[in-house]
Amino acid sequence: MPHHPSSPRRLLPRKLLQRRPAVAACAAVAVLAAAAILLAAPTTEAPSRTLLAGGSIPSRSREDPHATAEGRFVESSSLPPAEAPPPSLKASFSSRITPAGPSIFLAPAPSPVESVDDRVMEEPEQPDIKENLPKESAPFLQEPISSDSTSSSDVSEDLDMSVHTVPPPNPEIPLWSTAADAELIYAKKEIANAPLVSGHPDLYAPLFRNVSIFKRSYELMEALLKVYIYHDGAKPIFHSPFLKGIYASEGWFMKLIEGADQDFVVRDPNRAHLFYLPYSSRQLEHNLYVPGSNTLEPLSIFVKNYIDMISAKFPYWNRTKGADHFFVACHDWGPYTTKLHDELRKNTIKALCNADLSEGVFIRGRDVSLPETYVRSPRKPLNGIGGKPASQRSILAFFAGQMHGRVRPILLRHWGDKDADMRIYSRLPRRITRRMNYVQHMKSSKYCICPMGYEVNSPRIVEAIYYGCVPVIIADNFVLPFDDVLDWGAFSVVVPESDVPRLKEVLLEIPESRYVAMQSNVRKVQRHFLWHAKPVKYDIFHMILHSVWFSRVNQVLQVQ
């Protein structure tokens, strides 16, 4: 049974916030002083942890470092001759911008679940620090895309061609225009008029909301996208990815995009379509959180100071008020550390594992739901992937893990040790693990139950995909990973939290033929969730980058 290293991912009960000890306040001040040192330090320096907080930093290892990630960046972009943008698009153009132009937001599929948070098996309790978070409505829904190019009437049923004009949320008009803006506008028009696709060898249409749009968007990303990475910021907060454990997604992405031989990175910021803020939410928590303080204030102030420094030192943030900037955060606290900087919280593209609509931080249509991947071995991230075929899966449903959050205790109360078909445990008993461990259970089960914990995100969802088990997601207000392009109804089951008492009935109502199709689709979608030391086309690294690119394209306004 996998064991998750201790990790203060859980948020502290609100009532504890009212009893903060004076000592914690002093410690927080010390941490803030250390944060100033980090921000001012040059990128090349990597101060030891003992320099922070005026003495020592909590060095609690809450997760394993494992994976690797490399980015790709091309400084010369070339489309096929017939599809290349006219030379005029490369030239500068008027800075007058109007909200006109095609919009490629696709009508969202039925909202999946509400919230899914978990830590795979034995995860430590974490403080609950959702303090004074601004609640803003986020009704803006984005229609995901799907891709495949080449026209064919055979795929018309797979395409949602309801491309319509929807103004992006809080659009910010750039202070001046760039050639990169022209390329984004060109890409937006091309995607809106994507040719139909059928029989693509690498893209299975039923997995996507609109495979034609996805394919055209992905092609344009490969041909045009330039990302500028800020070099400012000292280690360990910046440029120091954790590569193992439940927060590995943010680390792998950072590792890969900052790696050698990138295809997408550009050194000239004036040519960039996107600007990457290379800090780690996991490192923020690990190095700046004061144990027992029950507050994220030091982390939030550190992030605010960093953005203020970037905007004062460079003109790029101010040009769009942060709308063409993005960061990637898998730690639960990632969304909450943005609360002290309005432009960062409202305008920046946030790639978050904790993609919870109910908190008022994650903005659907602008932000990106990041898959939470539990990496056990960075050197062999694909080790152990696979599972039994559908016909040999003897267990109807399986779950084992800690009983935190509002859903899991209800799940255990109704199904724990009550039904041989429903293998629901708080922890796997030794008498059972002697015969079959946690991973073997997932590889032998038809459905893997993925209930929310304290937060909505859960590594179990991707784990289930890795082991060929159909995920059953129980969480309300959760935006599922890559929801902008993938049709989760093709390979998963979303169950409202209120239906936990009738969970077995819900699963048995699914026809066997439907289950077999979903299990087959789980195996097909697996490639889009895999990390590779050297990124592979359509893998998780490229899918994350595409979601950020697609969000930016959707936001760009027409230039007069």
Image: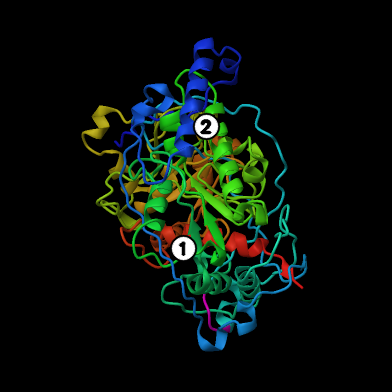
Neighbor class of circle 1 (other Cα within 10 Å; few <14, some 14-19, many 20+) is some
Residue under label 1, please give it. Answer: 267
**Label 2, label 1: how many angstroms apart (C-alpha)?**
29 Å
Q: Earlier in the sequence, mark 2 or mark 1?
A: 1
What is the magenta range?
Answer: 148-152
Q: In percent of the image, x 45 and y 36: which residue is there?
A: 38
In the rendered view, tell whether residue 476 sits above or below residue 510: above
Q: How is the image coloured?
A: rainbow
Which sits in the foreground, 242 or 75?
75
Q: Is residue 37 left or right of residue 318?
A: left
> What amino acid type should be assigned to the residue bearing mark 2?
Leu
Q: Position of residue 485 (x, y in %)?
A: 55, 62
Residue under label 2, please give it. Answer: 299
Residue 412 can be seen, yes or no: no
In the rendered view, tell whether residue 348 sits above or below residue 163: above
Q: In percent of the image, x 47 and y 60: which residue is there?
A: 543
Q: In percent of the image, x 54 and y 11: which residue is there?
A: 22
Q: Position of residue 544 (x, y in %)?
A: 48, 57
Neighbor class of circle 2 (other Cα within 10 Å; few <14, some 14-19, many 20+) is many
Which sits in the foreground, 506 or 158?
158
Which sits in the foreground, 113 or 225?
225
Q: Is residue 490 left or right of residue 136?
A: left
In the rendered view, tell whether residue 229 sits above or below residue 163: above
